[in-house]
Structure formats: structure tokens, C-alpha cells
Amino acid sequence: MSDSSTVAEEFAAYLADNVGADPFPIFRRMREEAPALWVEPLQAWVLTRWDDITSMLEDGDKYGPLMNQPGTSSIFGRAILQMSGDEHRRKDAIIAKRLRGPRYLGSTIEDIVSGLVHEYGEQLPVAPETADLRTGLTEPVPLGAIAELMDMGEASNFRNWYNDIVAAGTSNVTRDPVVHAQGEAARDELYDFVTPSIEERRTCPGDELLSDLCSMEYEGERLSDDEVRSFTAFLLSAGIETTDRALANLVKHLILQPEQWQRLKDDTELVSSAVTEILRYRPPVHVTIRMAKHDLDVDGTTIPEGSKVMSFVSSANHDTARFDDPDVFDVGRFQGEERPNYTLIGPVRAFGGGPHTCTGSLLAKLEMERTLEYLLDRFDRFEFAGDVPPDTGIVLRSPTSLDVVLHSAA
């Protein structure tokens, strides 16, 4: 066993210059040699093994929400991630009814997503022109879907608000003051935009998610306006970033491995498996952050009470103790076994686990599947317009842009 300080230095080097870097070799070393590691630049304990990370996600007695520290979602205010126990369960159920219920997924949401995919997909330029799939498709589809589900209308600044809020939240692990200030300003603008709608829904609720939030009660009281605003900011960001980044990662690796694209062209029944596989292979969210509620023993290492704990779910998804050949991208890996990975029981940790499993996971699944189906149907192949776009980011990781040349199917 090597000195854990060497592993820590290598990991710190990755944190300092992660653009285009491959973190998975150092994750493997960390799992083998230092699975619970204090990382000074993050001021946090880092977990990398599937078992330890799953325990952190599932065990509410040992781990709880972390507020007001770099790399957390505190910028949204007190939203669902900062809640636990009965309060979390009951308030999360309001969102789940709209985002996971068969009544909505099978009709209303299906129609919204399919319409958006077609609308934006038809605007994509084809060869020899260049298309940026992120700004042209993978971002506007989930943005449009969550805005319509909340009946927030069209706001020209949605995209800028989303980008600035996300950059200042979980992505801002070093608490860059300029980035944080920009995020707070964007959040405040979003709050100002949504406040009149909240006031309207209080007196005249409709059949959409914002009205659900305005009407729900917990312990005999409705959510406050501040809570509704916090939920709205969180849902706007969380409802976009997973789908957007995961699709960008999927397209990138289908171009890098054209034989996998051809498998999908030959057998579209593999679409759902391919979507699930990219969530394992290159998850859009690399890290989940919690707090140790008391002194904990993790693999022989003591994590003190009150410590910030960062679980690298991307590492868990490559743990050989849980997945065979985890460094292989295989679009057929999950065929027939996809759905559990969007619930509490599946092994893929892209959507967290335990009570804080992402409520919008089935919405993301639907958005990704419909987008991939559209690309397979309309295009014969695609290629990078220039160099391979590098992955960037510590907590949220994907290419920042995806410039491609699209070749229409005959």
C-alpha cells in the first residue's frame, strides 16, 4: 500500500487542472489505497468506493445536509436538498407526483418533450455547416420542459440565469467571489421574475408544478414565498443540467466510438440502455456532498463530526467491486435492466441514492431517450467540427460546447 499523501497530491493536481484530464485512473488508486481521503483544497473528506458512497447516500443517521459551504446548493436557499426526514419525504412527494407519476409522464410530459426535441432538432444545421448541439438541442430541450411544467412562460434570460446559478452553486468548489456574486444576482432576478406568478397561484392555482408548490401544506402551513422561490430556482437548474450534460457526454462518446453508434442504428431497442450506460460511464454530476453528523469510521479512517464529505459518484460507477469491465463503454450493458437505475434500488449512482435519489430522474430519462431517438432517426453519422472537446468541471463535468457536423440519413 502506497503513502496516501502521494494519492492526495495526485488528486489535488487533478483538481487544479482538470480540463481534459482523465480522473478515473486516480479514482482507481484512491479506491484501492485511500478510499476515505482528506483533500485540503476542497476542505473535505473524499469517498470513492461504491459501498461507502451508497452508505453515505442511504444512511440519514450518519450523514445530513450541508449548508453554506463552497460547492453546495445553498445558493438556491432552503430547497429540497437541505431537508431531511418527514419534511423531505412529504415535500418531495409533491414534486414526484408531477415528475414521476404515470399520468403525467405517459401523456403530458411525453408530448412536451417530444415536441421540444422536434422543434429544436429541426433547426439544427447539417453538413457542411457546424452545429453546437449543447446550445442548439441538449440545453433548450430540458430548459423548455421544466419551464412549461412550471407554467413559467418564456423568459429570455432563463438560459443566462441557469448558467450563472449553476456556476455559483455546486460547481463553485473554491467559492470564487465573482462567480458567487454573479450567481446571486441571477438568482435574485429569477426570484423577481417568478414572484408575481407565485402571488397569482396563491389565489388562482392551475394544474402545473408551480401551483402544486404554492398550494401544498406541511404541518398545517403552506410553503412560504421564500421556499417556493428556492424550489423554483433549484428545479430550474436541476431540471436542466443532468439531461444537458449527460446528452453532451453521450454524443461525445458515440463519436469517439462509432461502433457503438452503429449498434444503436442497427438496434434502436438499445436506446434506453445506452442512456443508462452514459449515466454510469460519464455521469454529468460527479459529486454528492453531505455532512458527517457524528464521528464516523470509514474503511479504518475517522471522519470527524461536522466534516464536509464529498462522494465521487463517478468513481463509484467505475468500482470493479460493483461493475464488470467498468472502464468499457457498452451501450448494451443495461438492456432490460434500465429502470431500477432511476429509482432507489439501482446500482448506478448518477442520480444519488437513498431518500435523496433525484426526483426528476425519469424526466431526464425520457428527455435523453427521445433526443437520442431523434438523432438516430434523422442523422446517419456525426463528427467533431474540430478538436475533441475536453471535459471540464469537478462537480458537474462535461464538454462546455459540442461543435459537430451532422450528416443527414439517406
Image (cartoon, helix red, strand yellow):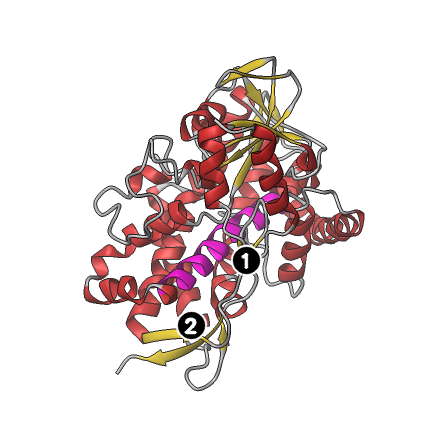
Label 2: few (<14), some (14–19) or many (≥20) C-alpha neighbours in 10 Å: some
Please check the rendered image and state whether residue 246 is part of the magenta-colored stretch, yes or no: yes
In the image, residue 191 above or below residue 55? below
Q: The residue under label 1 is which amino acid type?
A: Gly
Q: Is residue 358 visible?
A: no
Q: Residue furthest bottom?
A: 128
In the image, residue 143 above or below residue 352? below
Q: Residue at x 28, y 57 (%)?
A: 271
Q: Residue at x 64, y 16 (%)?
A: 304
Q: The residue under label 2 is which amino acid type?
A: Gly
Judge by depth and name the residue closer to the eye, 180 or 320: 320
Instruction: Identify the secondary structure beneath mark 2.
Output: helix
- Position of 272 with respect to 136 (left or right) is left
Q: Which residues are magenta?
A: 233-254
Q: Residue at x 44, y 43 (%)?
A: 98
Q: How far across and how far down the image is residue 293, in percent?
A: 61, 16
Q: Quadrant of the C terminus?
A: bottom left
The residue at which mark 1 appears reads as 20
